[in-house]
Image: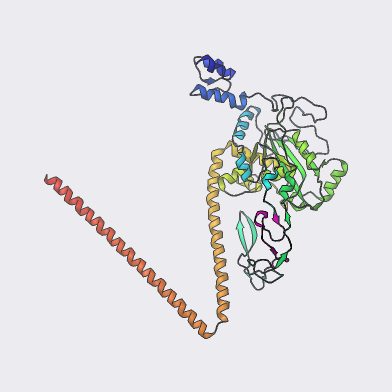
Amino acid sequence: MSPNRLENLHPQAQEQAKAPDQPHCWTCNQSFTTQRKLNDHLRFSIRHQPSTLWVPGKNTPPRQPGKTALSSSGNPNVEDSSPKIALAKDGKSGWSVIPEVDHPAVLEALRIRVHRESTLQTNNYITKPFDPKDYVDRRKCMRCKTKEKDAVGRECRFHPKPLSKPDQAVYPSLIFLIYERKKTHKIQDPFSERTYTCCTSPPTTPGCTTGPTHTFSQNYRYTTHKGYLRTPPASPSTPKYRAVVLDCEMAGVSTGGPGEAILLCASDYLTGAVLINKYISPPEKISIMRTTIHGISRYTLTQAIQRGDALAGWSAARAELWKFIDDRTILIGHALEHDLNSLRLIHPRIVDSGVLVRNIVGCTFGLKLLCEELLNIRIRKNKGGVHDCLEDVLATREVVLFCTRNRKVFRAWGEGKKEEEERKRGKRVKKNEEVKAAKLQAQLKAKEEGMSEEDRLKKRIGEEMVKRVAEAREERREADRRAEEKRETRKEVDGKRLRGEKEKREEER
């Protein structure tokens, strides 16, 4: 190898390039077919990169004034008011305990599954800071729902009152059930005859009222996107965690949108140690508490705020999370886009368990079902299935560990689930067609009852003619099929005869 090329290699690669038994990585005890592959391994492998992030047991982060110190066990010395958990080292807790020697391999398996920016954008992640050009011509009229770019020269015609509710007494089949993944959903019949209460016209009719001008408004995402910030870059003087699992609980607020975070939980991916478990005081007035989902009542949140145990809004929660992560940290979660949106956070390295499943199966699965299917672990075992934020964090960690460390098993499970979902989708389509046919038959029967005898006779004659034409077509198709079979048979017989004559001539020669 020339001296110029030798200088461009990694220092360890320079030593091994001179050795007679090259190429081989003595640190990892791994051999390579070419020197180039060894050099790429030494450049990009986590084990050979300079450690600027904190790894439990490897290096100790310096204590800085005004920041929470990290204990030797990896747990932050948080206030006594914040709940904590202890992971059992004997495995009785149900959560995985990763040996320290396996940390590099676990991080490498996780790094491979980090989503690309295009994948994040497809799954509704915000990956870029606010730019007004991204929202050009996205405004809509609040009344006629016309886009701003299409509203030039058009009147604002709208219905001032909503559609009427379906009359279940008149149409008893308007509500039917669909069973999907052990859940029962009530679906409204799309073929119901609903009308606008302002003018009794069907849904496809243009508006009955004309406004003087269009009233345009931006969506909720445009309003909140202005407050989004990127995760601070990595710094050697302030080492952070390499992988963190995150989850938030939300409550509906008066300004609308998906809601604001009221609880933030985060844990270290490698050790499972709890980093954050604190309530958040939302900046807006809470309109819907959603206690049946997360179990947090208004009284509990108010008491935490009065004691001073809650973080002051999403900005303080985001700053608290930044104490443990930087832009090189891998954030893990289930449907993590909602949590990052509630914190107004843009992060480049993300592994979402929901996206991992959706890329293979093609549809979304809940965290509870994933734990039952993949891990045989039951979460939310309380009466109402109430979410435990900290339990969801640790369960997400287990799911991602399984998906990254058992890739072949995970892919086999995903392919089986994909076939099962396709069968269910076919059954749903068949059920919808049956409901549509039954509804159409009922309408035709009701219409026939109001016909006169002459109209009924004409209709019956018409149906008989259609039936005869269909039978004639079917007979013609059958005759064509028999003729085609006869031609194929004759062609095969002629082919055998020609082959026999050819063989006979060859024998005579």
For the image shown, how many numbered marks are present on the structure? 0
Residue 391 drawn above or below residue 489: above
Residue 390 in picture, x, y percent from top left: 73, 42
Q: Which residues are magenta?
A: 140-166
Q: Main secondary structure of the magenta part?
A: loop
496 or 4: nearer the viewer: 4
Residue 82 left/right relative to 109: right
Picture coordinates of residue 59, whole percent (x, y) = 71, 24
Q: Where residue 488 appears, x then y in whole percent? A: 28, 58
Residue under the point 67% across and 51% down: 138
Q: Residue furthest right?
A: 306
Q: Is residue 37 above or below residue 356?
A: above
Q: Is residue 142 magenta?
A: yes
Q: Nearer the viewer, residue 133 or 220?
A: 133
Q: Nearer the viewer, residue 453 or 187?
A: 453
**What colouring style does the render use?**
rainbow
Q: Is residue 16 visible?
A: no
Check the picture and name the quadrant holding the C terminus.
top left
Q: Is residue 181 visible?
A: yes
Specify the farthest residue to the left.
508
Q: Position of residue 76 (x, y in %)?
A: 77, 32
457 sits to left or right of 376: left
Name which quarter of the figure residue 152 lies in. bottom right
- Magenta run includes residue 284: no
Q: Is residue 150 above or below residue 240?
A: below
